[in-house]
Amino acid sequence: MFKVNRNYLKLPGSYLFSTIAKKVAAYKEMHPEKEIISLGIGDVTQPLAPAVIEALHSAVEEMSRAETFHGYAPDLGYEFLRKAIAENDYKERGVQIALDEIFVSDGAKSDSGNIVDIFSEDNIIAVTDPVYPVYVDSNAMSGKTGEYIQEKESWSKVIYMPCTEENRFVPEIPEETPDIIYICCPNNPTGTTLKKEELQRWVDYANEKRAVIIYDAAYEAYISEEDVPHSIYECEGAKTCAIEMRSFSKNAGFTGTRLGFTVVPKELKAADGTMLNSLWARRHGTKFNGAPYIIQKAGEAVYSDAGKAQTKEQIAYYMNNAGQIRKELSAMGYTVFGGVNAPYIWLQTPEGMKSWEFFDLLLEEANVVGTPGSGFGPSGEGYFRLTAFGSAENTTKALERIRAL
Ligand SMILES: *Cc1c(COP(=O)(O)O)cnc(C)c1O
């Protein structure tokens, strides 16, 4: 008789966005006449840029002829794409990344979930609280988080680093020493960032403790302030302690097209000298069979002059929404954070309302869907996330409805 992976049975609750989808579906069924605006899930709405579409078409054309047909992609990804990444994302910022340190994938969600494969279950994991749920759940699924403590809403082998208004949402070095530290910057959900010196402090700490930082830079393209690093490798010593993940989803609208990459420097070694680069290469080659050729060509086009200009416009469009949400909510008396270097606005719920209470209020009275902060961790209680990924029209309309509450 087969047995299931019992780690799955220990997972608390259901996945946040499934719960939201169910609540919204139930409301729609009761009120089919209502028009609901979603500023909830972090998904883009602008179509793919013309340069990307053009690259897709011509890659499809290549696939139709025997001489230019492509089968399985190389393990690490096509060199044309890894070169474009090394050149544009790193060399231009003064960082040297070798081509065999870049692993092309189908996105940062799978990479951040899969990276747990190369670590032992004996590690202590540190995450910010609130946190992108994938980091903790993927560790829990492979039995790396210890026991779930119901009354604390936390796992015994996970250190939760509270990020609140008091510390400007910047995680502080915890009392207990972690082995694996997850940092998402710009942050989902709080929309906040670490300045260079703040990130450098984490890099120095990780090197001193021989810990590894898993750095999720999915929102790198939204950084507008000068002193915020775009890559963790801009910090001195990061190559001996950090893995960086990137995605084409939020900077170029590939959420449905799927493309991302992970950088694992060769200098990054465990205490016994094992190179994490070799382990990840082995894992990648065994359990992943490459992102599609046509999508990698589309990714390459993001780095063309036209691609850069067009995706920059898309980001400006979303950040215009972000600015509007920030400005108008502030004028209504809300306390808001984020929305400057990220497409997320993190607001305090009014009058100390619980996050889910505010969710229900917004859904029922304004027909606007957002994301309750408590879904991202205990410190998210009393906060609420709105995204700037809607259309400008819907963003304006949603704000009018919130004003009328
Ligand atoms: C959207 C997002 C990703 C990227 O996901 P993809 O799988 O590349 O679409 C990664 N990390 C965070 C924190 C995100 O919000």
Image (cartoon, grey):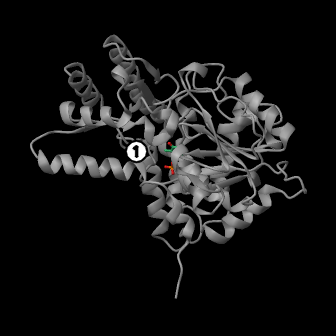
Q: Which residue is drawn at 20% across and 30% down?
A: 366
* Residue underneath mark 1: 48
Say which of 10 and 178 sits in front. 10
* Image-based side of 221 in relation to 280, left or right: left
* Image-based side of 343 in relation to 135, left or right: left
Image: 249 above or below 111: above
Say which of 190 and 106 sits in front. 190
User: x and y percent of residue 275 in the render?
Assistant: 83, 56
Is residue 389 at least partly visible in the picture? no
Q: Which residue is drawn at 90% across and 56% down?
A: 273
The secondary structure type at the circle numbered 1 is loop
Q: Residue furthest right?
A: 272
- Quadrant location of residue 236? top right
User: x and y percent of residue 97 in the render?
Assistant: 76, 44
Q: Residue furthest bottom?
A: 1
Image: 40 above or below 352: below
User: x and y percent of residue 36 in the render?
Assistant: 21, 39
Is residue 202 at least partly visible in the picture? yes
Say which of 94 and 159 sits in front. 159
Q: Residue at x 42, y 29 (%)?
A: 382
Say which of 367 and 216 sits in front. 367
Whether label 1 lies within 8 Å of ligand 1 gets the answer no
Q: How many labels does the image show?
A: 1
* Image-based side of 218 in relation to 284, left or right: left
Image: 10 above or below 401: below
Image: 343 above or below 288: above
Q: Residue furthest front?
A: 151
Q: Residue at x 60, y 44 (%)?
A: 246
- Quadrant location of residue 305? top right
Crowding at mark 1 (Cα within 10 Å: few <14, some 14-19, many 20+): many
User: x and y percent of residue 49 in the render?
Assistant: 42, 41
Instruction: Identify which amino acid the numbered label 1 is placed on.
Output: Leu
